Amino acid sequence: MESQELRRAGLKVTHPRMRILALLEQTEARHLTAEDIYRQLLDQGDDRIGLATVYRVLTQFEAAGLVLKHNFEGGHAVYELDRGEHHDHMVDIDSGKVIEFSSEEIEALQRQIAAQYGYEIEDHSLVLYVRRKRRAHPSTGSG
Ligand SMILES: [Zn+2]
């Protein structure tokens, strides 16, 4: 449970930490801003945790290796639980939606490129900024 995970990460068990960790584990969106988390706590009737506390707890989680923080362009930082499996991201620039993907081909290609320069990859992040393809309307020319 959350309390064990907190202790394992070297953090004391507190109400805000328990609630925020549980929320990150249960969310379908997986990538949340501090404001998203704050609002969801409010929606769940928890008005004891302020936005400043949410930010503080997320910073502690990041330092403890529980969460990853992403600073995508044109938006607020988003946080996700570090599940230990590498993946890359796409950001829909219209909706802000974050999509996860992973490609063995891209991973291999990146290793190959680094090797060409005499390096091996320690870490990397790849973000694609995307926009939904519109259907073509050749007859009307609109769209
Ligand atoms: Zn992710």
Image: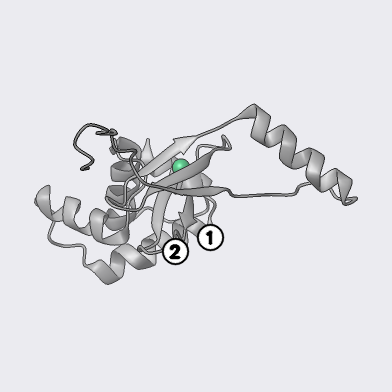
| Residue closest to the far front | 139
Residue 142, quarter of picture: top left
Query: In the image, residue 60 lies at what x, y percent?
Result: 46, 62
Query: In the image, residue 28 lies at what x, y percent?
Result: 29, 35
The residue under the point 54% across, 38% down is 87
Identity, as a three-letter code, of the amino acid under mark 2: Thr
Question: Is the residue under label 2 in contact with that under label 1 (CB below 8 Å)?
Answer: yes
Q: Mark 1 points at which residue?
A: 63
Query: In the image, residue 120 lies at what x, y percent?
Result: 82, 46
Q: Which of 19 and 7 is in front in this view?
A: 19
Q: In which quarter of the image is the N terminus?
A: top left
Query: In the image, residue 37 lies at what x, y percent?
Result: 26, 54
Q: How far apart are marks 1 and 2 (CA)?
A: 6 Å
Left or right placement of residue 91 versus residue 126 in this view: left
Residue 143, quarter of picture: top left
Say what secondary structure mark 1 lies in: helix
Left or right placement of residue 113 versus residue 49 in this view: right
Is 83 situated above or below 56?
above
**What numbered label is drawn on residue 138?**
none
| Residue closest to the far right | 118
Q: Residues within 10 Å of mark 1 (few under 14, many from 20)?
A: few
| Residue closest to the far top | 104
Residue 85, quarter of picture: top right
- Which colouring convention does the figure follow? one colour
Q: Mark 2 points at which residue?
A: 59
**Number of numbered discs:** 2
The residue under the point 28% across, 57% down is 16
The residue under the point 68% across, 49% down is 123
Identity, as a three-letter code, of the amino acid under mark 1: Ala
Left or right placement of residue 114 versus residue 85 in this view: right
Is 95 situated above or below 74?
above
